[in-house]
Image (tube, grey):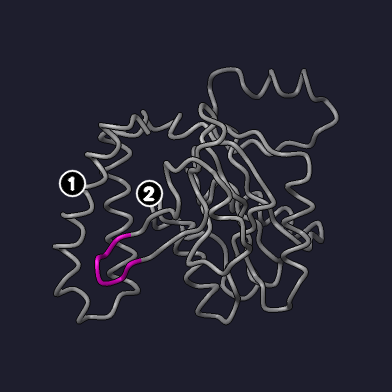
Amino acid sequence: NASSDGTQEALQKQFSDVEYIFNPTNLRFAGGNNVGIDYALRKGADYILLLNNDTTVADNFLDELVSTASTSLNVGIVGPKMYYHGDPNRIWYAGGKIEWWKGWISHVGVREIDNGQYGQTIETDFVSGCCIFVKREVVEKVGMLDTAYYIYGEDVDWCIRASRAGYRIMYEPKAKIWHKLSVSTGGHLSWFKNWNKLKSQLKIMVRYAKWYQFFTIPFGIIFEIIKNYTKVRTSGF
């Protein structure tokens, strides 16, 4: 994605047997991944896996994602359980929740220590783009990631479109990864991250929420911003 720090040369030198795509400009998350998605589909891929480069994964995580995606024809997208890399038993994602009346989009289980409380494979509202496993037919039916989002929200939008097209969005806890959060956007409390997350969240609400939900959405967003800012400041996560 137009890296200028020597990444291209370093990768080619260390992993010479890998095929690379180097974009001449920074297409951001959606545009950059769409280039890869298009390439994979043209090569005949049955599934697409988007995985952030600031993650480590359990040995069997991909097997578990494939297994869950294969359980039913209408399962379209699957996501793993995701932990904080720096605190490997603390949950970052155990499902995604969209609260339309609040105008709020959040992760289930975020900041909780994993004691097995989110150990069931369940349907969920969205999967984080940090690691999202998608069937080919979903992309063919609803399209790729929407580049109208500057950053953040592309994954949620994708899942909403898939869900409304009749596909189930699944959380699979037997697949596990660990994520170094917000490395490229300045950390949890950076202005860049939070301002762009809010803009994307509002875009999603404008697109998909019912008109009458906007009577409560502004109040819900203000309440959740204050609540979450306080949690992050006190917990460090």
Q: Give the amino acid at mark 2.
A: Tyr
Question: Where is residue 63 drawn, in percent x and y?
Answer: 79, 52
Does 175 sit above or below residue 229? below
Q: Give the amino acid at mark 1.
A: Ile
Quarter the N terminus occupies: top right
* Residue that mark 1 sits on: 226
The residue range painted magenta reads: 99-104
Q: What SS does tag 2 mark?
A: loop
| Mark linked to residue 150 | 2
Q: Work out whether residue 66 or residue 137 is closer to the camera in this orientation and state it.
A: 66
Q: Residue at x 27, y 60 (%)?
A: 202
Q: What SS does tag 1 mark?
A: helix
**In terms of secondary structure, what is the magenta stretch mainly?**
loop
Question: Where is residue 136 drawn, in percent x and y?
Answer: 71, 66
Q: Residue at x 30, y 36 (%)?
A: 232
Q: Quadrant of residue 201?
A: bottom left
Q: Residues within 10 Å of mark 2 (few under 14, many from 20)?
A: some
Q: Residue at x 72, y 53 (%)?
A: 39
Q: Residue at x 72, y 39 (%)?
A: 58
Quarter the C terminus occupies: top left
Magenta span includes 20:
no
User: Is 133 placed left or right of 90 in the picture?
Assistant: right
Question: Where is residue 86 drawn, in percent x and y?
Answer: 51, 26
Q: Work out whether residue 212 or residue 20 is closer to the camera in this orientation and state it.
A: 212
User: Is 201 placed left or right of 136 in the picture?
Assistant: left
Q: CA distance from mark 2 to mark 1?
A: 24 Å
